Image: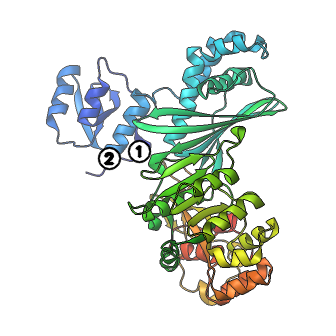
Amino acid sequence: MNAIAYTEYPKEPVVLDNLSVKFMKQSKFIPLSVTDNTLEIVMADPSDFYTVDTLKLSYGLRVKTCKGKVEDILDAIDRLYGSGSQSLEMIIEEADKDIDEISSVDVEDADHLRDLASEAPIIRLVNRLIFNAAEQRASDIHLEPFEKELKVRYRIDGVLHDVESPPTRLQAAIISRIKIMAKLDIAERRLPQDGRIKLKIADREIDFRVSTIPTLFGESLVMRILDRETLVLNFEKLGFPEDILSQYFDLISQPYGMILVTGPTGSGKTSTLYTTLARINSSENKIITLEDPVEYQLGGVNQIQVNPKIGLGFANGLRSIVRQDPDIILVGEIRDKETAEIAIQSALTGHLLFSTLHTNDAAGAISRLLDMGVENFLLSSTLLGILAQRLVRVICPACKKEKQPEEKLLKSMKLPLQELTGVRFYTGEGCEECRHTGFKGRVAIFEFLPVDTDIRKEIIARSSTEKIKSVAIKKGGTTLRQDGWRKVKAGVTTISEVLRVTLAE
């Protein structure tokens, strides 16, 4: 008997008197329909006669069974009968109906706003927005006020998606509710604020970083979702190719020196560095990190959060760390000349130091540090290697199918004809599994620049980014786009994804 597709499950709950959610979960079944005197159910094990007989006796109906996947059944029970039983649309309607006075609220009245933000419909609405985002594997929730709407968007696999938006008259109460949860000042709406929320969602401890800024039509609020369960501490799963991985392992086993990871915000730099620290963490090494903020807690690692308000920045925090006798140091980001100089001094005095920079490619990190005013001879003697990375979306395995890309996309990759011979291209059609996006999850593409004698000469000569890059490529280096092409050939991602995150070469 073939399992029925999740799309055939009911959109609304089939109501039966005294039907216990606990019984459905234990017996792994869900009603599909009741017609005449036949109850149709989908169950994980259609040969479970005990459950079938219990339903026959309880409702006096004939029971027809279909086979379903366990995960689909449990998901449908939650969606239709459990915590997910009320759709966001229903909750918004309820909140809109129950809180009539919001339209006349004076948004300057903080006490009134606090009362409204504590009303059950607003609490339920905010909880649902957060629950849905966590369920859909979103990394961020954006609430953006405009003249005629409050726009709500989730960032899933690096791309923003619109979701059902509440009416603008609920805006002040919703923002205030989240600010109360993050212990922010709801009376202050003229200045940006930052806070944190810790919640338990479906037995998972999830942290939310909350940031607000004032805009023309009210406060814009972004919640960054930090779910430790989504942190992958595995180099292969991150997307490291074997050739880069073996070179990188040689690098991180060095006793001292500086290793940099570069890329824009949200390119997976933190995951790479945490995976690196997890690999080299041992009882013989003392590891101290200085981060802004500490996103995930790592066992056996001393993690410090910078706090500029009290004068604990990267530069003076790094000075103090060196006096703590560490073997390995992670500095969240090199933002200025002072931090760069102290980082280099730390690497020179027998520490293995990791940090990040926001540059377009690996070679660009050298130019950036030299532009900051770092001495070229110091940089050439401390820098061990630079890893640049981006994240591309992975084709959904459930709806993956072969499809030839458009000619102009192939031309944009600027590949020789022999490279295209015999390559099979894939795309995701879109299904329930990937929420009709065609993609599920992300993987990194990498560019690795080991600093050897030739690169050191270029650093001493203060060569341009282009010159350093061409030297690296002549020695067999792989660019971001080339690693992306390898993942296209392996059927992991699409050409359009690689073009989306990489610059033309």
Can residue 294 be seen here? The reply is: no
Q: Amino acid at mark 1?
A: Tyr
Q: Amino acid at mark 2?
A: Lys
Neighbourhood count class around disc 2 (C-alpha, 10 Å): few under 14, some 14–19, many 20 upward? some
Q: Which SS class for mark 1? A: helix
Query: At x 79% / y 84%, what residue is drawn?
Result: 461
Return the disc, 1 or 2, that comes first in the chain's sequence. 1
Query: At x 54% / y 29%, what residue is drawn?
Result: 128
61 on left or right of 410: left
Residue marked by disc 2:
69
Measured along the vertical axis of the image, is residue 312 above or below residue 106? Answer: below
19 on left or right of 336: left
Marks 1/2: CA distance? Answer: 9 Å
Measured along the vertical axis of the image, is residue 399 above or below residue 107? Answer: below
Residue marked by disc 1:
6
Measured along the vertical axis of the image, is residue 252 above or below residue 282? Answer: below
